[in-house]
Image (tube, coloured by chain):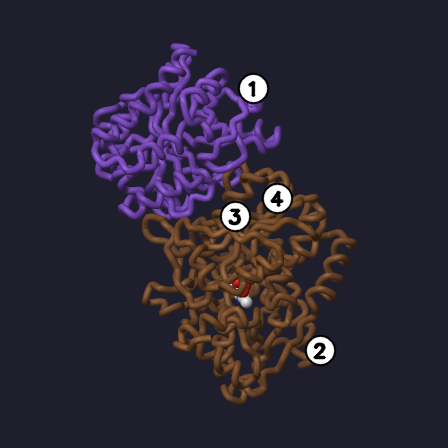
Amino acid sequence: MNRIDRRFAALKAAGRTGLIPFVTAGDPSPEHAVALMHALVGAGADLIELGVPFSDPMADGPVIQHASERAIAAGVGLADVLGWVAQFRQQDPDTPVVLMGYLNPVEIHGYVRFAQEAVQAGVDGALLVDCPLEESAVLAPLREAGLKQILLAAPTTAPERLAHLCKAAEGFLYYVSFAGITGAARLSTTDIAARVADIRSHASAPVAVGFGVRDAESAKAIAGFADAVVIGSALVERLAGATSAAEIAQRVQAFLAPIRTALDAR
Amino acid sequence: MPDIRDFHAYPDEHGRFGRFGGSYVAETLMAPLAELTEAYLRLREDPAFIAELDRDLTNYVGRPSPVYFAERLTKHVGGARILLKREDLNHTGAHKINNTVGQALVARHMGKTRIIAETGAGQHGVASATVAARLGLKCVVYMGAVDIERQKINVYRMKLLGAEVVPVTSGSKTLKDALNEAMRDWVTHVADTFYIIGTVAGPHPYPLMVRDFNAIVGREARAQLLEQYGRLPDALTACVGGGSNAMGLFHAFLNDRAVRIVGAEAAGLGLASGHHAASLAAGRPGVLHGNRTYVLCDDDGQITETHSISAGLDYPGVGPEHAFLKDAGRAEYVGVTDDEALEAFHLLCRTEGILPALESSHAVAQAIKLAREYPKDGLVLCNLSGRGDKDVHTIAAREGVEV
Ligand SMILES: Cc1ncc(COP(=O)(O)O)c(C=O)c1O
């Protein structure tokens, strides 16, 4: 069993909602990238989504765009990100790590090489935003190496397609809560709840909801019907400019702890 | 690469030109792209739509554009006859209008009320603002902050036409970033918004649709040459930014194997300098802006910043059909430097009284090189994609002249 499946099974058994923070790898500081991952776990993360910086993040809002730009300017590349996961794994053998990013860095690195190195580093899954199911034949080496292919579903996804996506979903299905880019805030929990119910009628995989979750209140609303919530832009924004490992850990704790509490109080 | 019998059979139903093209977009855009593909494939075969488009191309754009024998330029060069397909004479001054007229009609048929577009040189932005004004649609144009600075006249033209011009300050603040930002707008307003992409790039069906709307250029030129010269040209050339004017000229000739096809990319300060925008001549296969194609990127897969004196060629990707034609060996892609383009610009001004766009000047420079390779009775057909009024300030500044 993969770490992702194990983690969701454990959450289900405990009746808890998963907390999935997203951070851009190497932001706010490449030096403290591994410390940041440990801090996330320390503050209650059940799974870490680690963004691989890309120069042209078409699906991201300004907060993650800028984080990506800062990381690239600091010289962060895919090899660094894989190195950090390997280092993280030395102390944390259990928390699943999913790399999230765009196709070009992986394509240029080479799919087979990426798959081998990622598995070796201890990566559990990959969510490549600009690689929809229709184009995912190129990702075969990743699946063969044992990486879970995390798929997105969106409010615009048509019913037949949704059924299709649900069937192909591995690890968990990531439901994008509104049609837009990361970091915008337009949550309508009733709509999302209805869509998630739809997804559940097709999917056996757990459902994580992301885009627009910013705080304890919005997380708690989502937790009523999702297996996990993803929090990205609001966290990345909070971390920007932090310079020491202690400051990073302190900001992570201050931001995530109330969310963890709200999820557990459900 | 297998031997290809019919170049007109591409793309396939997934928008693939061999291994290039496709739809590499986030899930949220899959539905609007499917809706667009369905609408476009239907309209493409609809005689009423075709008649409507033809009427607009004739009465509004001013087609057909002439093929002009540049006699004094030819004499000056001393090689084969150079023929210019005069897209610079179109309404708004470039080939871009062929595409925006077509896409605006598609938008109207789909009931969309808001047009968005990205632009580099501003020509596509102007052409989009133009058709939006004509159809009474709201228009928002995304433009890199750097490009806004170097194409001020076109920014003002767009505003006069009623469009809102939004400066893009992310990334390199040029065309590629404007495209990212337009995609972000589209994903946020999918219900009422139609995204008019300005070149043969982007996800399926854009490379197909934009090529179709510009293919009128090559269809006309092919018939004009047969009529006026009784034969096909020896060689074709056009500048390649995203590749729409080039694809427009090339498409009708793809199955005429004896016709040589050469695309001129922006070599900027020279291919060896690293400061250029020659994705085909110097890039590698990758994924950018929704399709697999040749891109300029580093070993980490980060798209690199490009350089060209012409904003319209300053793009690190290229339409997937060009990538396909390159790998199939059907077309050659070569670099033309800033200096070569400027020299051709002045030469065309002085020998023919035609002031070409800086983009098109790259094609003229390549046509001159080609003309030297063929005998005097040879024919080299060059797409003069646009006029240079918009570039007068850039050229004056570069030559230290105040205007
Ligand atoms: C006159 C002219 N020619 C060529 C181009 C380059 O675009 P494409 O390669 O799509 O024809 C532009 C783009 O702005 C242009 O304005």
> Which chain is home to disc 2?
B
Tell me residue A10's x, y (percent): 37, 14
Name above or below for residue B31 compared with residue B161.
above
Q: Is mark 1 within 8 Å of ligand 1?
A: no
Disc 4 with disc 1 on a shared chain: no
Amino acid type of disc 2?
A: Glu
Q: Earlier in the sequence, mark 2 or mark 3?
A: 3
Q: Which residue is mark 3?
A: B182
Residue at (43%, 38%) from the top-left corner? Answer: A128
Quarter of the image with the N terminus of chain A is top left
Camera-side mark, 2 or 3: 3
Query: The chain shown in purple is which?
Result: A
Amino acid type of disc 4?
A: Thr
How far, Cα to Cα, is label 4 from label 3?
Answer: 11 Å
Q: Quadrant of residue B186?
A: top right
Amino acid type of disc 3?
A: Ala
Q: Which residue is mark 1?
A: A197
Q: Which residue is mark 2?
A: B227
Name above or below for residue B244 compared with residue B353.
above
Amino acid type of disc 1?
A: Ala
Instruction: Name chain B's colour.
Output: brown
| CB atoms of marks 2 and 1 within 8 Å | no
Camera-side mark, 4 or 1: 4
Camera-side mark, 2 or 1: 1
